[in-house]
Amino acid sequence: MKLSVKPFDLKLTTPFRISRHVQYTAANVLAQLTYEGVTGLGEAAPSEHYGEYRETVLATLKLLENELGDDPFALDAIFNRVNHVIRLNPSAKAALDMALYDLVGKLLNVPVYKLLGLNAAQTPLTSFTIGIDTPENMARKALAARDYPILKIKVGTPNDRANLKAIRAISNAVIRVDANTAWSPKEAVRAINELAEFDLEFVEQPVAPHDLAGLKYVREHVPLPIITDESSITVEDIPRVAECTDGINIKLMKCGGLYHALKMIHVARAHNLKIMIGCMIESSLAITAAAHLTPLIDYADLDGHLLVDDDPYTGVTVEQGKLILPEGPGLGVRERAAGM
Ligand code: MG
């Protein structure tokens, strides 16, 4: 198998602000894996928060090129070798993982969801995310997103109440909120009890990633379900967080791809947890890869490609929030035709 990599940028339609930072572009990496004239595609969307940059992704993929072997069907052996050679670097591993699943699906002429035995009709609705802004701008963005039945609103600022009030004034959508670790446990309890009047579905990651006692305290003192994101990165985290949360948010860029995400899904179910699949700022390539797993899960937040101006690919589409998987073999992702 031959691996080639290429950096590409995605430009956000508007700056994307969460409680801890603001993002204008995504510095992503395309991985192309070729075997017997067939090419599988994968994407890395590195996140500084998880210790990755474009440069570390490029260096990691260069290193892993020698571990691929010559059998793309030997996924288990390949991922074992990869994890033996290099720890962490999950988005680089995710790019490789996606390219392998795409390649295997194309070689067998089946879509990835079929390869996994899943029913494409069972995809959930995805939320559309609104980053932190003024109440007026957040309400304007919520109005522009009126085709999406579920909104995910970023919180963790002193203006959360005003922001949600402005959005609720113009929207009947299901609303979930994400604090991205902004609060102390006591602040979280106060904030969530205050925000609950806006009829929220759940709260994502109220407190710091490793404060599991704090998380448990919050869960016991608020009327809404809690979903962890920054606290649940890999499969090993799940038994630790299981007593402190109602569910977990899995992202390919945190756990290392579909292979590891599948393990997380099964372990989470064994702990009676709800499961969400989320994303970073990604093109339709990585978003579609994640979407292939969604018949297995409860909540989707796969909108990274909807937040950028220059998505180079087409794949999964969204109709009234419903994720529609492409029918092509592998991931079913294509390069976007000019002008589309
Ligand atoms: Mg989150």
Image: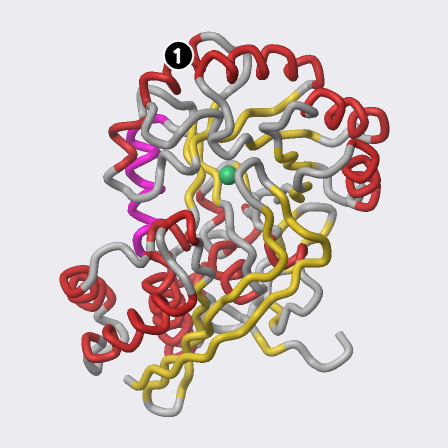
Say how many tags the image has.
1
Extreme residue toward the top, this view? 221
The residue that disc 1 covers is: 217
Figure quadrant of residue 32: bottom left
In this rendering, is residue 101 above or below 122?
A: below
Quadrant the N terminus occupies:
bottom left
At 57% from the left edge and 50% from the top edge, which residue is drawn? 302
Please tell me which residue lies in front, 37 or 169.
169
At 42% from the left edge and 67% from the top edge, which residue is drawn? 54
Q: Residues within 10 Å of mark 1 (few under 14, many from 20)?
A: some
Mark 1: secondary structure = helix
- Residue 29, given in percent of the width and then of the height, sits at 46, 71
- Residue 297, given in percent of the width and then of the height, sits at 47, 41
Extreme residue toward the bottom, this view? 37
At 53% from the left edge and 58% from the top edge, which residue is drawn? 287
- Residue 327, given in percent of the width and then of the height, sits at 56, 67
- Residue 213, given in percent of the width and then of the height, sits at 32, 17
Quadrant the C terminus occupies:
bottom right
In-image side of 78 versus 146 (left or right): left
What is the magenta segment's predominant secondary structure? helix
Is residue 260 inside the magenta stretch?
Answer: yes
Residue type (three-letter) at the residue carrying disc 1: Tyr
Figure quadrant of residue 59: bottom left
Q: Magenta span covers which residues?
A: 259-272
